[in-house]
Amino acid sequence: MFCACVLTARAQDVDSVLYIIEMLKDSPESALFNLNQALIDNPDSEELLRVRADAYENLKQFDKAVEDYKALTVLLPDDETMWYLLGRNQFLNGELADAMRSLNRSTGLNPRFFPAFHTKTEILLHQNQYDAALRVSDSTLRIAVTAKTYFLQGEANRRLGLWQRAQWAFSEVVRIDKGYIEAHIALANIAANQNKPVEALEAAEAALAINPDMNEALIARSRGFALLNDFYNAIEDVSYVITLYPDNAEARFWRANYFSSTNRYAEAISDFEHVLRIEPNNWKAIAGRADAYANTGNKAVALEGYRNLLAIAENFNEKNAIILLANTQLFELQRENRPPALTLIEPESINFGITLEYDTRTITIRGIIQDESPIQSLTINGQNIPVIVVDEHFEFVALISLENLEEIKIEVSDVYDNTTVANYLLIRLAELSE
């Protein structure tokens, strides 16, 4: 073990700092112990504080890294790098407002210090402020044309749904750095979103050539397979991820969708429910589970799912799309119980009675049917009558012989066998005069 007394004696010696850096690679706990001991006697050592802060960041102990970088900004108040490192660790520790203040201090000291602008963009993306993130990333490109700058610009465009601009930005990333695996994955997912399976598979394969076991790349490739209706390989890819990481919600979600696409609804429901145990408000999983239940004939659970979706819609940026989806599915699930609505236009009827001259031999019957479902049949006194679609309703017209008739009976059924029957009594004027 490196002796703390030696470190204390040589706290400003570069060789000591380098020794600790090497020690951190093999034995971080021992190295941190020695750093802590050394800093007791040298609390203002910039070198030691910087090494310890960096060690804490690498160990994901961001709260401790923040404290050390705060001390460094006191010692080096005009150093834009220290303010940037403080802001980055505040961001990683969830202190977003403080992080932005520190990063603004960094860029105030050096307006061309692009790493600080990168982290500002990441914070705005984290806060779903995509327009602001795009403005910052666009301005950063004027001072630094780097792969990361283009990547952040691509992310902002992607989240805004600007697929072509996002695709261009991610393509610039891989032009600059072919090993930027996240950009290949982003290109694969954009292609999948645009129903371009070949492009999706090519980009996913490029990512997998860099890291054959990367979860996100396997999931992206599965989407390409699914677009080609190759659900066997799609399920294989995401199942491999789930074998290694059973609680990977994204892999579970996509496998559930692939199961639904192959009518394996019980397995789909199981995966959707696993996703919802991890992410209870994942609206796409709620909708997918409801759809799977509907396909198994369990309408009650499906209806409950879509009602739950309506209840949480306001919490999402896609709320209008969610509300439309939920309301559409609720209508579809419930409309089987709604019979067609029949309105008689001609002749005029009062209390289901039709008044006729005593010698009327034929009558024209014209009416409107309102039903969101297709009409299966329409009969008037047992005679099949054709219906035509007009805008959002159906219309019919028929010439009916009145010989030996005492009433007009109209019967209309939709494809769900919901039926409406209307009986109209024929009242002849001769009969009223008696």
Image (spheres, helix red, strand yellow):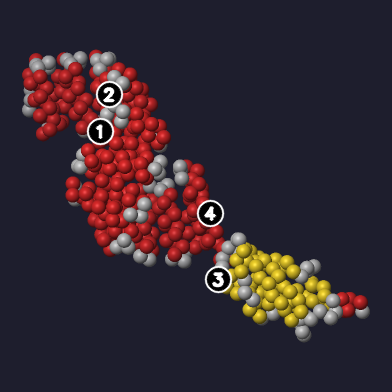
Q: Nearer the viewer, mark 2 or mark 4?
A: 2
Residue hosting label 4: 327
Q: Which mark is residue 415?
A: 3
Q: Secondary structure at mark 1?
A: loop
Quarter of the picture holding the N terminus: top left
Task: State which tag comes first along the sequence, 2 or 4.
Answer: 2
Say what amino acid the circle numbered 4 marks: Asn
**Which picture quadrant has residue 174?**
top left
Q: Residue furthest right?
A: 434
Q: Secondary structure at mark 2?
A: loop
Task: State which tag comes first along the sequence, 4 or 3.
Answer: 4
Q: Secondary structure at mark 3?
A: loop
Residue hosting label 1: 146
Q: Residues within 10 Å of mark 4 (few under 14, many from 20)?
A: some
Q: Secondary structure at mark 4?
A: helix
State the separation of the CA atoms marked 1 and 4: 45 Å
Quarter of the picture holding the C terminus: bottom right
Are the two marked residues, 2 and 4, in contact with CB atoms closer than 8 angstroms?
A: no
Q: Residue furthest bottom?
A: 404
Task: State which tag comes first along the sequence, 1 or 3.
Answer: 1
Q: Nearer the viewer, residue 385 or 35?
A: 385
**Residue 124 in sight from this viewpoint:** no
Are the two marked residues, 3 and 2, in contact with CB atoms closer than 8 angstroms?
A: no
| Residue at 49 percent of width and 63 percent of height | 299
Task: State which tag comes first along the sequence, 1 or 4.
Answer: 1
State the separation of the CA atoms marked 1 and 3: 60 Å
State the separation of the CA atoms marked 4 and 3: 21 Å
Q: Residues within 10 Å of mark 3 (few under 14, many from 20)?
A: few
